[in-house]
Every structure is written in structure tokens, then in C-alpha cells.
Amino acid sequence: MLNQWIQSLLSSAINRDLRRREERARAASPPSAVIPVLAPGGLVLGHEFSDEEPQAGAPVTLSPEQRRRHVYVLGATGTGKSNLLLRLIESDIAAGRSFCVVDLRGDLVDRILPRLSAAGDAEHWRERLLLIDLRHEEDVVGFNPLVGPGDAYGRAFHVLEVLRQQSDSWGVQLEETLRNCLIALAETGGTLLEIEMMLCNASFRAATLAKVQDRYVQSFFQRFDQLSAEQRLGWSMPVLNKVTPLLAIPRLRRFFGGAHTVSLQKTLDRRSGQVILVSLAVDRLHQAAYLVGGLLVSAIQNAIMARVDLAEGDRIPVNLYVDEFETMASEQFETFIAEGRRFGLGLCLSHQNLSQMPTRLREVLLNNAHTQIYFQTGAGDAAQLAREVSLDLRRDALQRLLTQQRTGEALIVQRGDRSRRIRVALSQDPAVSPALLAGLRQASWQAYGRTREEVEKELEQRRVTFERPAEPAPDAKKSAEALKPKDQTKEEDYEVRHRPRRGKPGQDKK
């Protein structure tokens, strides 16, 4: 009996020792030895770690469904944001998913192109890749935000919203004048380049209004034509001041002014696997780049929201990446964040610090982004973000952790799950020859672009057609009485249609 008891005791001790050894071996094994269970089209972002077990950790994965519920990335420059975005984009390429990237400088676009080239030859990407690179002046891909899905009013108001968002001053008369110009041009297939002609060239204005159906727009320009030359100038100059960044830079005149425009809606709805890459060339275009980015993001939003008439199963999934997004987000972007998922859109928004965002946009984003990834931040952001993190640490310890993370380390916060510290896996740049990259760019341009000379010739022909404006001489008898509403109902209707949607009261800058 005693011997059996001793043998049992020894056996239990040996088994416990073996279990401990196995547990230590598993903990010491490299993260790559742990094989994750991935949803179809999912990816491994990186691996968990802690101060106690810096080498150990389970893989951290992200599924396509989690992507569709939006990803928010925050961190200072050089902390690992671009590497994370590339990991997500590589997953899209491998799965054949459609995606768009709006990049302020173009560095991210330059790193995506080799990945596309490694995944398929130039012929494969010829009509699948729409590349808009404003760093290149000779190859023009035209874009007209006044043409596209929806009605003319929706397109005009999207442009108006972006221009207002990018302005540091606004006024009631400015908004009314600009709004009527945009509606008239959107209704007749005009471009942003014609705003100046609409206000300063009577021949062009008359030719355009002859095709406009909206009686309120007609009425506004009847009043405009009856003003003195000095009054017309007073109404026009604040508007021209707002659109000058688009009119004064030659490459932007070619970008916005050509008759040929890409259709973002057709590109995204054509099939799965479509790619739109945008380099805004902020180092060359400076403040104007933010305006261009805002118009492009707004147009993508318009194209996605136009899917309301499609059955849910016909809405091709699209992931949209916007770096430094707060510089391009209009107030309508809040709706995009809240409702984009049901239209097949997954957002991945990244930037450097919370103070860059308006308070309301910040609240909408933090409440709606399912996955939030925080790289190293400043002390001010850490104090606010510590409230979003559910780690077993005191608040002051969490704040220190957020400010002291190393490059590639991040905190990931997901709704319905515990917060985790992760090391993001490194994305390796593939080796692709310059000739292959040039062929990829050329294939995209052949499908969507035109030469600089072609566009400039077209713009010059349009200018010459209306180079001799004939200022109208309105009959003095057809003055305010002819334009006066005939009853109170019409007067109220007129005021509602022309009342500014938003804007600070005050005088316009001239």
C-alpha cells in the first residue's frame, strides 16, 4: 500500500513537471509557431506581447467583416502607421478586393505600386488600376466633381461643402452666388474652371443659362445681370477668391477643366479588384492639395452612397484608406462614417493626433470605428485615449504606455473584446524593376488619361469661343418688379431654396 502511494505521488509530481515544461516551451516558442484560424480574406496584423512575456503572444487577426466596420489608426510620424496600412492593403490585393487610397504626399502610393506589379502584369492592371498622381504634369487624368451619380443639386452641394470646409471665412452672399454657379454648371455638364466665366463672361453665362432648367438659378442670374458692373464685381470677387487655388495652378486647371473625366462610380462598381490610387502632391501643391483631396473624397462618398438603388448583394465591397483624413473631411464625412458600412464600404482612417480633428468628427469616429489602433502618441492624446483602453493598468500607467511605445508597437482596441498590446508584422517591399513600374503607370494612363497638350488645346478652344463677352443691357423696366414673387407662398419658397445651409454671418472678403 505504501509503495503504491509513493508511486502515485511520484507519478503526479512527474506529470506536473512535464506540464510545466510544455507550457514554458509553448510560451518561449516564436509567435510564428502559433497558427491562427483566419476568416476567408482575413490577415494577421501582428502578435500580442507584454512586458512580462515580450517574446510570446497569440496572433492578432482582422477579418473582412471587422474591416467593414472601420479601422482607425492614430500615431505620431515614424511610429509604424504606414507599415500597418501596407499590411492591410497587401491583404486586399491578395484577396482581390477593391480599394482606394488617398495619399497626401505620394510615398504610400509609391510603395503600393510594386505590390500591384508583383501581383499581376501591366495588362492585368490596365483597366483595374486608376492612378491619379498630381506629381506628374505631363500625363493628365481628368476629374470633374460636378459630373457623376445623383442629381445636379447633390453634386453641387458636395462641392460647396468642401469649399466651405477649407475656407477660414464665409458669407451669405458668397454662398448664394457660388451655389447658383455650381448648380448651373452641374446641370449643364460644366467644370469648376467655368466658375470664373460664369461670373465674368456674359456670353458664356447666357449660353449656359439657356440650358438650365431650374427657375431659381435663372432668377438669381437675372438679378445678377441687372446689377451695375461694380456690384457684379462685388458679388464675384469673394467667390473667385475661394476657387483661386484651383484656377491659378496650371496642373489643377488641366485636372479639373478637361471635358474628359473619370467616373469613380463606374470604376468602383465595375467588378471586384478595382484599385484607385491618388497622390495629392502636397509638397508641390501645398494648401491646394487639401482642397483637391476633399473634392476627391467627397466624390468617392457620392459614388458609394449612390449604391442605395442597388441590392445589398450587388454592392461590391470597397476599402477606402485616407491618410491625414481630417484635412479632407467635410461635415458630410460624419454620415459617411456612420452609414458607409451598409453600402459595402470599409474605412481605414489614419492621422497623427486628436487635436487635428473637430470635436464632433472625433466623437463620431471613436463611436463608430470597430477597430482602433494607437501607436505612440503625445501626452495630450494619451490622456484622452486612456479612457478608451481596457487594460489592467492604472490610468497614469496607461498614459505612460501610450507615450513610450516603440516603433511598430501599438494598442489595439476592438468593440466587444479586451484591449491588447501588439507588435505589427513588418511589410517587406518587393523587388520590382523600374521598367515594370513604368509599364504599370503607362497601362493605367492609357486606360484613363490624356496628354498635357490635348487638354491644354481643349481648354484654349473653349476660352476662345467666349473671349468676347457681350455684357447684357437689361431693360430698365424689367427690373425688381419682374423678379418680385407674385404671392407669399412663392416668396417663402424662394427664401427656403436660397437660404444658406450653414456659414458664419459676416461680410465676405473682397
Image (cartoon, rainbow, N blue to C red):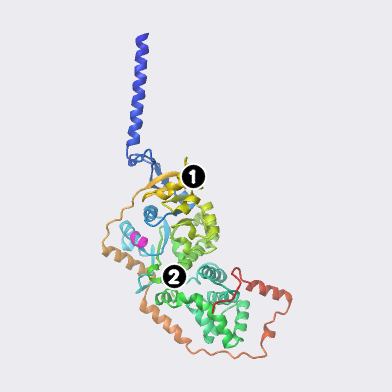
Q: Residue at x 36, y 9 (%)?
A: 2
Confirm whether residue 479 shows in the render. Answer: yes
Q: Position of residue 389 (x, y in %)?
A: 48, 46
Report the amino acid beneath label 2.
Answer: Gln
Q: Is residue 119 one of those drawn in magenta?
A: no
Query: Which callout, 2 or 1, points to the residue nearer the camera?
Result: 1
Q: Which residues are magenta?
A: 107-111
Report the amino acid beneath label 1.
Answer: Arg
Does residue 400 lie above or below 429 as drawn?
above
- On the rendered structure, is 51 left or right of 162? left
Residue located beneath label 1 in the image: 395
Residue located beneath label 2 in the image: 287
The N terminus - image quarter: top left
Q: Residue at x 41, y 70 (%)?
A: 286
Does residue 108 lie above or below 455 as drawn?
above
Badge 2 crowding class, 10 Å Cα cut-off, few under 14, some 14 to 19, many 20 or more, is: few
Instruction: Kindly identify which numbered label has been placed on residue 141.
Output: none
Quarter where residue 34 is shown? top left
Q: Position of residue 308 (x, y in %)?
A: 55, 60
